[in-house]
Amino acid sequence: MAKNYIIVGAGGLARELYHNLRDKSARLTPPGKTPPECLGFLDDVKTETAPGYPPIIGTVVGHQPRNDRDYILGVGIPEVRRRVALLFEGNEDLFPAWHWLWDDAALARRGIAVGAGSLIEQGQVSCDAEIGRFALVSGMIGHDVRIGDYCEIAPGAAVSGGVVLEEGVHMGACSTIAPGVRVGAWSKISAGSAVMKDVPPCSFVVGVPGKVYEDFFVPPDGA
Ligand SMILES: CC(C)(COP(=O)(O)OP(=O)(O)OC[C@H]1O[C@@H](n2cnc3c(N)ncnc32)[C@H](O)[C@@H]1OP(=O)(O)O)[C@@H](O)C(=O)NCCC(=O)NCCS
């Protein structure tokens, strides 16, 4: 990431990202050069950040995107990630794909494709994986995994080899998906659950082994 940046959202995830981005920028900037810096947060509800953080400089709704800066999506829930992406429609490329540890060359060497707006903000992706647009990875992703647009993989969640997560899947903290399983769009896996078989779209999965409640959620408009 070369430009100064704005974080969209100002909650806990946004604060985490602020630290991760700042530390990585400082690590990768050659001596004598200035690292890109956070210009502030956008938030529709909060008006002030915690002491020690950059200010909230405006709302997401009504914000006029500028291409002399980067944007980082700092909200977690898949439905909200999608809503923000739609507000920035036509300007999605202002949201760089970002990995907290690796640069673009390392991702390419490992066969990891990451779409615009997607963040591997902690946790890890091993190799040969495809991550769509505006997804958020904070857990562990094995080889040959496909993760759809807007998915959230919460901290401690683990996805084995060959898993497919369709658009908008939300994996709760410390949940697990067994190898080769496919999870349908806009399904939610509750914290600590283990998904052992394919899950239809819009389902809710709870427990170990995961009990699947079908047609539990309504997909967001037009999805
Ligand atoms: C599944 C979940 C959404 C349910 O939340 P909720 O609707 O507020 O439900 P409640 O806390 O009222 O619990 C309802 C019942 O389900 C049980 N339950 C809740 N979460 C559970 C879980 N993850 N696994 C097993 N049982 C669970 C509760 O014990 C309770 O049982 P009871 O009625 O017998 O007492 C929530 O617990 C969860 O797992 N969220 C994921 C959070 C997460 O990981 N976020 C990412 C943070 S970055």
Image (tube, rainbow, N blue to C red):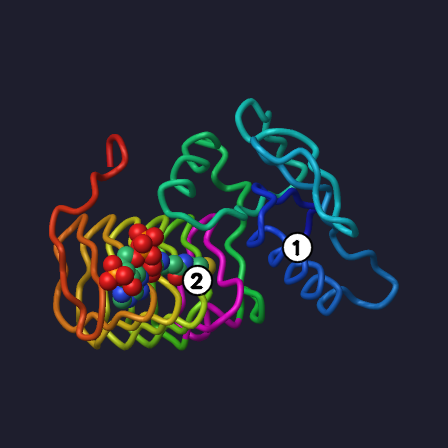
Q: Mark 1 points at which residue?
A: 18
Q: Give the answer, above or below, for where 184 lies relative to 94.
A: below
Say if residue 147 shows up in the picture. Answer: no
Side of 42 relative to 110 (left or right): right
For the point 29% across and 73% down, the residue is 176
For the point 60% across and 56% down, the residue is 17
Where disc 2 sits, the SS reads strand
The residue most toward the right is: 32
Extent of the magenta region: 106-125
Q: Give the answer, above or below, for where 102 lies relative to 81.
A: below
Residue 19 image-quadrant placement:
bottom right
- Mark 2 is on which residue type? Val
Q: Nearer the viewer, residue 59 or 206?
A: 206
How far, Cα to Cα, is label 1 from label 2? 16 Å
Where disc 1 sits, the SS reads helix
Label whose residue precedes the other's in the sequence (1 or 2)? 1
For the point 70% across and 43% down, the residue is 49
Q: Mark 2 points at which residue?
A: 137
- Mark 1 is on which residue type? Tyr
Q: Quadrant of ligand 1?
A: bottom left
Q: Nearer the viewer, residue 213 or 31?
A: 213
Tell me residue 186's x, y (percent): 25, 48
Side of 217 relative to 145 (left or right): left
